[in-house]
Amino acid sequence: MTDHIIVERPAGHPGIQVIRFNRPEKKNAITRAMYSAMTEALAAAEDDETIRATVFLGTEGCFSAGNDMGDFLAVAMGGGMPREVIEFLYALVRSTKPLISGADGLAIGIGATMHFHCDMTVASARSQFRTPFVDLALVPEAASSLIAPRLMGQQRAFAMLAAGEPFSGEEAREAGIVWKLCAPEQVEAAALSAAARLAAKPPEALRIARDLIRGNREEITARIDEEARHFSERLRSAEARAAFEAFMRR
Ligand code: COA
């Protein structure tokens, strides 16, 4: 149990489940308990026919600063990519219901790549999508190495995933990882209303349309596994440990 993830059914929005990051004092960095809470919520949505769509939200000015660095450091002392992370990624890929996200501000690491698994992402112009994997001596995750080149082409995918270049909200929209931009204070309402419109559609037709658009799940989970093997090995490397320690010492 963690109160750093809030799962709710917002009043006035039937059929919608919200999964909200609630750790603003740590820029919504994601701990193992938070991954587990999100995985449970996605599983609950699968089993509940009254839930027609899930919306991921952060807090004002911050979606998420990605994986908790303290957790990374703990893993660097021994172990691999935490099981909780992989289970969350599988749950994203296997979701049969629409996933919508609203990102205002920072979206770093998995806080950026998880949007690749969402069907419609609303962001603000001040958003920043950034994946400093290589700077941390890590490699891309969440099947981003497969999905990003398809979405935005080789050059932009490399700039984001390998060079760690930040993408503004506008650049992310142009690159196809954001559906539309709106003012920061409207991000949440826009994401909820997109989800509400989906929740009102015939669910079976929507499920089939979504499956056709998203493509082969096995291919995506196979890439998650392949990336995770490299990621786990890199996590235990001396260069990764040095990068995590440098962040913790700041
Ligand atoms: N894991 C753990 N704690 C994190 C964190 C993370 N990924 N990101 C931020 N925090 C914590 C900071 O340690 C700080 O905690 P403190 O107040 O106890 O010192 C707090 O959140 C606020 O962060 P701070 O760095 O002071 O805010 P900022 O506005 O100057 O910078 C970031 C924000 C996100 C740019 C910066 O914190 C950062 O680079 N974080 C790491 C992002 C990252 O590399 N994620 C992993 C990607 S694979």
Image: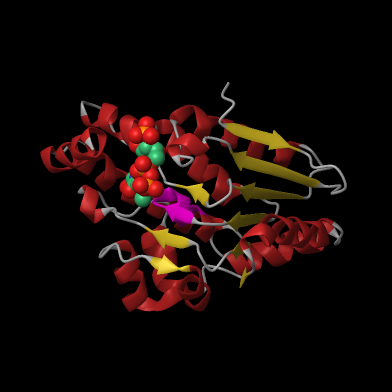
- Taking the image as shown, residue 184 lies to the left or right of residue 73, namely right
Percent from the top left, x then y, of residue 244? Answer: 23, 38
Residue 243 position by quadrant: top left
Residue at (22, 53) in percent of width and height: 135
Residue furthest to the left: 238
Q: Residue furthest top?
A: 1
Residue name at image x 32 percent, y 36 percent: 69
Q: Which quadrant of the figure has residue 208? A: bottom right
Q: Is residue 44 visible?
A: no
Residue range highlighted in magenta: 106-114
Quadrant in the picture for the N terminus:
top right
On the rendering, which quadrant does ligand 1 occupy? top left
Where, by quadrant of the figure, is residue 44 drawn? Answer: top right
> In the rendered view, would you say 84 is above or below 161?
above
Q: Which residue does the image show at 41% across and 52% down from the upper left?
A: 108
Q: Position of residue 81 (x, y in %)?
A: 33, 36
Q: Is residue 169 left or right of residue 121?
A: left
Q: Is residue 78 magenta?
A: no
| Position of residue 60 in the picture relative to residue 109 (left or right) | right
Image: 183 above or below 12: below
Q: Quadrant of the image for the C terminus?
A: top left
Q: Is residue 129 among what the camera can see?
A: yes
Q: Is residue 84 above or below residue 210?
A: above
* Front in this rendered view, residue 20 or 117: 20
Between residues 244 and 195, which one lies in front from this camera angle? Answer: 244
